[in-house]
């Protein structure tokens, strides 16, 4: 089966070192770290040895090279990452509030990250994909829909599968057009990876039971619901439910947990692991990632996740 392919923003992240200090005064920063939800996701797939590729765009600068070199080193196919001749690589500045909440200053749609398009390299990668992972966040980029639509059609033709992380910004989904695109992806998805209320956004109704029923009616076969430090639950169309306890870790940086979780769950399922074993690795991947500063610095290989599982207690 062909590689797992995703589409969307590739960024660098630069973090304020001291929680509680805003960006209104000079202060120590750390980074740049490679980032962007689709990039984190695909890096974690590749770290697990899964065939992986991403359609994205970076600038002709160090931030772009940093991302391409990391993804390539970790084993991802970077042939469909284009290099924009003028615009800089996208960036996100993040700072943490004392309660752990995050504030971002994004440069996304007006950077190279916002310039993805259905070019020849993107078509070539999507033509050989065996699985398409769609990130709701990518729908903020104007060219993303053409790529997603093309990818969904190719996947339908080759009998591949589709997953969706419905992490689209709420304001975006209030637009009629984006809501229609989002619904079209849900209708073609086999696996959903929602976190919290995103389950309801994907289902178009409130209430866990009603939302699950609505999604299964539309042909979704598995839903892995992420619950942060409470772990996660997998619901299957067949009616089975599998709860996975969270690993007990000290959270250093929550960014990227959901992406690593989703990548590990999907990759394990594509490798033929049963849902409970896939969920174990997914919970481990999410938890391990929050113990490291930097959005994809904690993405682990199977050896690293096995060691983490052996040495970490669960709630
Ligand atoms: P998202 O980043 O998409 O909002 P979550 O915050 O729910 O997703 O994190 C995804 C998964 O990562 C969780 O289901 C859990 O397995 C793991 N995880 C996240 N935060 C923690 C934490 N503080 N302790 C342990 N596991 C965590």
Image (cartoon, rainbow, N blue to C red):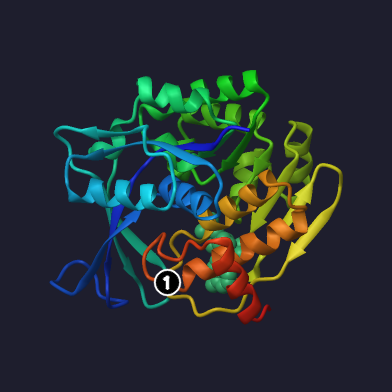
Which residue has dot 1 on it? 292
Q: Is disc 1 placed on a helix, strand or loop?
A: loop
Q: Which residue is drawn at 48% across and 75% down?
A: 251
Quadrant in the picture for the C terminus: bottom right
Q: Position of residue 117 (x, y in %)?
A: 35, 25
Judged left or right of residue 202, residue 58 is: left
Near-viewer residue (117 or 93) = 117
Ligand 1 position by quadrant: bottom right
| x then y, percent, for residue 77 | 42, 39
Figure check: 69 above or below 116: below
Q: Quadrant where the N terminus lies?
A: top right
Give whichever of 297, 37 is nearer the camera: 297
Q: In this view, does 178 lie above or below 308?
A: above
Query: Residue, x 48% and y 36% (percent of image)?
Result: 174
Q: Which residue is drawn at 81% across and 42% down?
A: 237
| Residue 229 vs residue 97, the one in the foreground | 229
């Amino acid at each position: 089966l062909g590689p797992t392919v995703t589409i969307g923003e590739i960024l660098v992240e630069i973090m304020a070192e001291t929680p509680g200090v805003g960006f209104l005064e000079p202060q120590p920063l750390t980074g740049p770290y490679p980032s962007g939800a689709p990039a984190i996701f695909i890096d974690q797939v590749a770290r697990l040895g899964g065939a992986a590729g991403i359609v994205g765009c970076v600038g002709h600068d160090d931030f772009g090279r940093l991302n391409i070199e990391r993804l390539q080193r970790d084993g991802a196919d970077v042939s469909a990452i284009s290099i924009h001749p003028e615009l800089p690589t996208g960036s996100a500045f993040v700072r943490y509030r004392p309660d752990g909440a995050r504030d971002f200053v994004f440069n996304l749609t007006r950077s190279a990250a916002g310039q993805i398009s259905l070019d020849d390299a993107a078509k070539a990668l999507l033509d050989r994909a065996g699985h398409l992972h769609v990130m709701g966040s990518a729908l903020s980029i104007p060219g993303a829909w053409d790529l997603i639509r093309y990818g969904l059609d190719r996947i339908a033709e080759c009998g591949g599968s589709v997953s969706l992380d419905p992490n689209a910004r709420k304001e975006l989904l209030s637009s009629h057009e984006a809501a229609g695109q989002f619904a079209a992806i849900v209708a073609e998805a086999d696996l959903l990876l929602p976190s919290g209320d995103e389950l309801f956004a994907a289902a178009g109704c409130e209430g866990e039971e009603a939302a699950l029923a609505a999604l299964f009616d539309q042909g979704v076969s598995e839903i892995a619901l992420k619950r942060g430090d409470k772990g996660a639950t997998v619901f299957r169309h067949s009616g089975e439910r599998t709860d996975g306890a969270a690993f007990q870790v000290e959270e250093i940086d929550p960014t990227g947990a959901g992406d690593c979780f989703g990548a590990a769950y999907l990759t394990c399922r594509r490798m033929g692991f049963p849902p409970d074993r896939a969920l174990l690795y997914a919970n481990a991947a999410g938890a391990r990632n929050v113990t490291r500063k930097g959005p994809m610095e904690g993405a682990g290989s199977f050896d690293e996740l096995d060691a983490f599982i052996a040495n970490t207690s669960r709630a």
